[in-house]
Image (cartoon, rainbow, N blue to C red):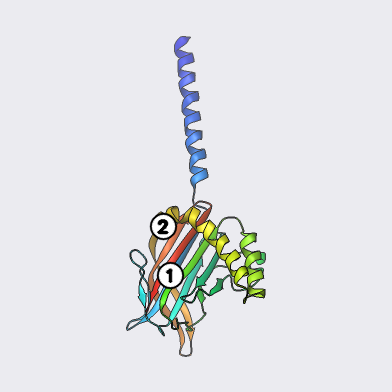
């Protein structure tokens, strides 16, 4: 009788332990998954910049293009604070973008075979990249207000403070959530469809990702 009770108790404890582990795994599971890269013109076409060490160097006039691809239903927000301390929202590309669900497939900014470039003066160019399982309505509201009042330094600072608060809380974990994954994209050019493969940064993290991406503009 004592042996049977001990056996039942052992089984019960084992089941509880398994459920506890299962619950922990669920809580920590990655629900923010996406890929990103910043491509720069080179002698061998557009290649991804390397952000694993010191900020990469990019010269004025070098063509750039940003690649983003949602892997899960997460909300992605991207901004550029340039060397003149001017903020530009880059993604989403329109107001209420996430009202209509989530995009599928790679997104290029700007689209097709277009590019953008840094202009003098040189200095540090800062991209703010945020991704969240939950929609960030405060970021969206402040972005809309900033776009409506782009000349307002105070409005820009309100938005930057909100962005940097999120990034400061999450940047260390965000960096450790990154890996490299080979991707293939297609661009529509004047000559037809052009394919390109490269290694992009793949993110898998729980709840929220925040990253400050620096480029040394020469």
Give the quadrant of residue 103.
bottom right
Residue nearest the observer in this picture, 191 or 157: 157
Q: Which residue is mark 2?
A: 175
Measured as percent of width and height from the top left, residue 90 is found at 55, 73
- Residue at x-position 65% and y-position 70%: 144
Mark nearer the N terminus (2 vs 1):
1
Residue nearest the observer in this picture, 99 or 8: 99
Answer left or right for 176 relative to 128.
Answer: left
Mark 1, Cα crowd under 10 Å, few <14 / some 14-19 / many 20+, is many
Asked if residue 27 is positioned above or below residue 189 in the image, the reply reads above
Q: Which residue is mark 1?
A: 37
Measured as percent of width and height from the top left, residue 96 is found at 67, 68
Answer left or right for 136 relative to 17.
Answer: right
| Direction bottom: furthest residue | 190
Q: Is residue 32 visible?
A: no
Is the C terminus in the top left, top right, bottom left or bottom right quadrant? bottom left
Tell me the CA gap for discs 2 and 1: 14 Å
- Residue at x-position 45% and y-position 59%: 203
Mark 2, Cα crowd under 10 Å, few <14 / some 14-19 / many 20+, is some
| Direction top: furthest residue | 1
């Amino acid at each position: 009788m004592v042996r049977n009770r001990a056996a039942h108790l052992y089984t019960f404890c084992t089941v509880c332990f398994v459920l506890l582990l299962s619950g922990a795994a669920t809580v920590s599971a990655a629900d923010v998954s996406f890929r990103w890269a910043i491509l720069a013109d080179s002698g061998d076409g557009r290649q991804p910049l390397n952000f694993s060490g010191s900020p990469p160097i990019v010269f004025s006039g070098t063509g750039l293009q940003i690649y983003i691809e949602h892997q899960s239903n997460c909300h992605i927000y991207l901004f550029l604070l340039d060397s003149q301390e001017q903020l530009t929202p880059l993604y989403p590309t329109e107001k209420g973008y996430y009202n209509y669900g989530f995009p599928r497939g790679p997104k290029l900014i700007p689209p097709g075979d277009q590019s953008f470039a840094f202009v003098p003066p040189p200095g540090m160019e800062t991209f703010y990249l945020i991704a969240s399982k939950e929609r960030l309505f405060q970021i969206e509201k402040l972005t809309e207000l900033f776009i409506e009042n782009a000349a307002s330094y105070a409005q820009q600072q309100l938005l930057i403070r909100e962005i940097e608060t999120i990034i400061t809380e999450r940047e260390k974990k965000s960096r450790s959530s990154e890996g490299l994954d080979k991707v293939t994209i297609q661009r529509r050019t004047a000559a037809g469809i052009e394919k390109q493969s490269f290694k992009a940064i793949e993110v898998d993290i729980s709840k929220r990702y925040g990253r400050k991406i620096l480029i040394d503009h020469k």
